[in-house]
Amino acid sequence: MKVQLYIDTAQTKLSVKDRLFFIQSPHRNQQISPLRIDSIAITSDVQINSAAIKLAALNNIPIFFYQREGKLIAQLRSPVFLKHADLRYKQLIFMKSVYGNKWITQQIIQKIKLQSLTIKRWAKILPSTASILEENILKLEDYISVIKLLDAKQINLDKTIMGLEGNTARIYYKSINLIIPEAYRFEKRSRQPGADYFNVVLNYLYGLTYGKVTKALHAAGLDTYVGALHKTAHKETLVFDFIESFRPIVDRLLIDTCNEHLWQPQHFNTIEGGYLINKEGKKLLFTSYSDFIKKRINWKQKVTTIENHMFHEARRLKIEIENTKIHVSDIL
């Protein structure tokens, strides 16, 4: 089983020795085969020589650079996906058409359904809050009905969807606050930095998932900068679109670890405006996440690992883009 190589020790050097990655740190030296590595995550100042970069590219191993808050800020990867020029042109047309609107609408519906399933799971376990959770489930189902009725030809449909999705998110996070122990509860979603333990860990988990999703999309030959819902310039908008239906799945890892009381004050450092995960916390996070995405789940009538679902869904999107016949009247 492949693993993510995680480097967070300052003054570490990454090079190549005997066709293996050679990691030199102030504490120890280590060699590891590229065949064992899925990706490389770096969160501190590390020296990487060109041989290591070439070895990673030849083995299709992306290198991700994160800020200390967990935000992905840069990546190095093989340019293989750039060869798919015809597919990328079709993708651009698809995402600017009614079919792109239909695809992202289904992504958001799937996201809300999974959020609802998470709440249902805990409503059965927590009888003291079951009535409130069940009421929130009904609210989410109402929003699904509203979104299903949206006209895919509507101009600025993305703004309408974003507004509705924001409303469902507030219901969902209020429900999570009833599910997790009081020590981990939060006022609202906060990002850079996370204002509490829950948001800090969630930001890191999403950051890791961005990397996995990006790899899946590139493996399918898709352009991560061409999406349907998120349209911020110079951002990998398709990654933000595609990850939506996987967020509730990743949330379950954090909910479970909070309910197991795994996150403790010694896993965090306090900074102005919030917290950061320290080295001990990152070890716990990366170990938990690595095990979690290898977990097999039944999703869309297919049983495989969460990570494989990402690749499967990326291929499905590619096939949909290639097989959809788009007319001029379909372009918005």
Image: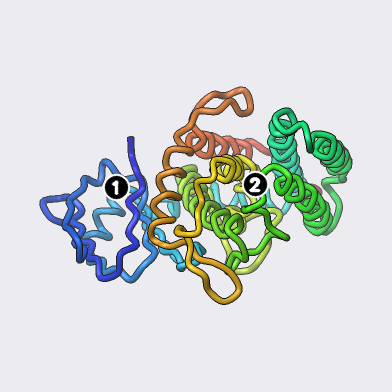
Instruction: Give the residue displayed 78% in from the left and 53% down from the top.
Output: 170
In the picture, the quarter occupied by the C terminus is bottom right
User: Is 26 in front, or is 34?
Assistant: 26
Q: CA distance from mark 1 to mark 2?
A: 43 Å
Secondary structure, mark 1, is: loop
Residue 114, percent from left and from top? 69, 37
Q: Is 80 on the left or on the right of 190, as rendered?
A: left
Callout 1, which amino acid?
Answer: Asn
Per the image, the residue denoted by label 1 is 59
Earlier along the polypeptide chain: callout 1 or callout 2?
A: 1
Per the image, the residue denoted by label 2 is 181
Neighbourhood count class around disc 2 (C-alpha, 10 Å): few under 14, some 14–19, many 20 upward: some
Dots 1, 2 in contact, CB < 8 A: no
Q: Quadrant of residue 137?
A: top right
Count the numbered circles shown. 2
Q: Is 128 on the left or on the right of 245, as rendered?
A: right
Callout 2, which amino acid?
Answer: Pro
Instruction: Give the residue displayed 58% in from the left and 35% down from the top.
Output: 316
Vertical arrangement, residue 317 with respect to residue 272, above or below: above
User: Is 316 in front, or is 178?
Assistant: 178
Secondary structure, mark 2, is: loop
Q: Quadrant of residue 186?
A: bottom right
Neighbourhood count class around disc 1 (C-alpha, 10 Å): few under 14, some 14–19, many 20 upward: some
Q: Is 265 on the left or on the right of 29, as rendered?
A: right
Looking at the rendered image, the disc whose residue lies closer to the viewer, 1 or 2, is 2
Q: Can the viewer see residue 327 in this picture?
A: no
Instruction: Give the residue displayed 62% in from the left and 53% down from the top.
Output: 184
Q: Residue furthest bottom?
A: 272
